[in-house]
Amino acid sequence: MKAIQVGLLGAGTVGSGVFTVLKRNQEEIQRRAGRGIEIAMVADLDTARAASIVGDHATVVNDARQVIANPDIDIVIELIGGYGIARELVMEAIAAGKHVVTANKALLAVHGTEIFAAAHQRGVMVGFEAAVAGGIPIIKSLREGLTANRIEWVVGIINGTTNFILSEMRDKGLDFDAVLKQAQRLGYAEADPTFDIEGVDAAHKATILSAIAFGIPVQFDKAYVEGITRLAPQDIRYAEQLGYRIKLLGITKRVPKGIELRVHPSLVPSKRLLANVEGAMNAVVVRGDAVGTTLHYGKGAGSEPTASAVIADLVDITRLHTSDAAHRVPHLAFQPDQMSSEPVLSMDEVVTSYYLRLRVADQPGVLAKVTGLMAEAGVSIDAVLQREAGEGEKQTDLIILTHDVREGAMNEVLARVQQLPTVLAPIVRIRKEELA
Ligand code: HSE
């Protein structure tokens, strides 16, 4: 049988990995897919770079629409990124009856509903394993391997750049800006790292995971997003003294009132495997009612790890190419007419525990006042750590760990505590996930 014909849009790091891995493992991939997979056409504005990757194995063009217009192309791989031209090309490829494979989390988190509906209508597949946690097959695990379960929560380290920065801040006691510069020098962080460090990239991925886990539409606009730019080295140190590490977590949970969808720095008990995921590695923990807790760990980015996920989608599509569209695995795990309207909750409704750092005057009664206000508001305290004031120092740090409390209630009591004349600086508040 003739090899399935693939068109590649964007011949950068991942595109070159897809080409290399397909070539290196072609025999084994063909035995698995039941048919050869061939990149026949590549579009990139930099045609010289594209040609240097594919040699004379594929036609190189500078106009992606030539790939979409080619009737011989069965599958289009979109590796351009962003919501602009990538969205137009994906929609055009679907309209032309091509299957699409993409690593574009931003596009799917924001426009996924429209894209999946168009694909469903046209009877084509959109593969996006590479969009979340790079090489870790978390989409397939959630959508197929764990399909028997009622998923309770999914919590992950799904951005390698920020995990690298946090690991370095903890290991070397450096502040955020110094480590970011080092990460940029080493190529771990982009020249414009905004999406990574502000938590947006992780929120795109968490949004996709929430849809697959709970059968809700992708709703990036409902995600709470907080990055790591304001984390101070002393909070990492105090957390460590209390038996915790700070990680940027993507969290989506089913609770009685709806679905939580949030990305923010969190304290995680040091003894949890997730707390020990270091450097640029990714890990996702899934809790299902039948299976219990499962941990999925691996490289979240990079040329060949991401290519591994892209090619897995190519193989899936190749295997399904002759089967009827209505019987394929649904894009978001649940049948399109079975999506749930459970609401994504506002942060005020989220119940979690907290690490608080207060800069206070070192004088009698301060701790009692702070804890008194908390007791009045029904906030239960789990642990308190007071740094001993240095010789002649009149201020000190007071660290408080709380038990679970509704975020809205926490905000109200913190506003009152902040007003105390003995609280000398803005209170630092980091959420905490026990993951028990
Ligand atoms: N920029 C992402 C990260 C990789 O740092 O994990 C691509 O999603």
Image: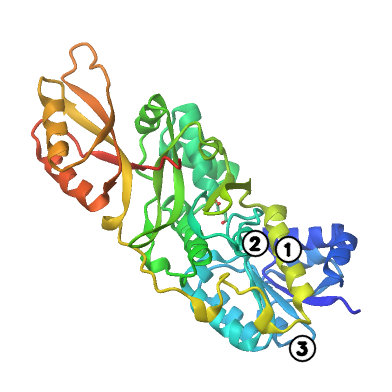
Determine whether the beta carbon of the residue marked 3 sits less than 8 angstroms from the nearest atom of ligand 1: no
Question: Residue at the left extreme?
Answer: 421
Residue 72 sits above or below residue 14 on the image: below
Find out whether the residues at labels 1 and 2 contact each other: C-beta distance under 8 Å: yes
Q: Is residue 360 left or right of residue 100?
A: left
Quadrant holding the N terminus:
bottom right
Amino acid type of disc 3? Pro
How many discs appear?
3
Q: How far apart in space, not on screen, are marks 3 and 1 (Cα)?
A: 23 Å
Task: Name the residue: 54% across, 79% down.
Answer: 336
Q: Is residue 41 left or right of residue 46?
A: right
Q: Residue 348: which quarter of the image? A: bottom left
Q: Which mark is residue 312?
A: 1
Query: What residue is disc 2 on?
Result: 140
Q: Nearer the viewer, residue 143 or 148?
A: 148
In the visual, does 27 lie left or right of 78? right
Q: Give the percent coordinates (x, y) of residue 229.
A: 38, 45
Above or below for 190 versus 140: above
Badge 2: how crowded within 10 Å, few (<14), some, or many (20+)?
some
Give the secondary structure at mark 3.
Answer: loop
Q: Which residue is mark 3?
A: 71
Which residue type carries mark 1?
Ala
- Of 40 and 279, nearer the camera is 279
Residue labelled 2 has its Cβ within 8 Å of some atom of ligand 1: no
- Badge 3 density bin: few <14, some 14–19, many ≥20, Cα 10 Å: few
Inspect this view and state whether residue 142 appears. Answer: yes
N-terminal-most mark, 3 or 2? 3
Residue 304: image location, x then y, percent = 72, 54
Residue found at x 53% / y 45%? 184
Q: Secondary structure at mark 1?
A: helix
In this view, the mark in front (3 or 2): 2
Q: From the viewer's perspective, is residue 243 above or below residue 32?
A: above
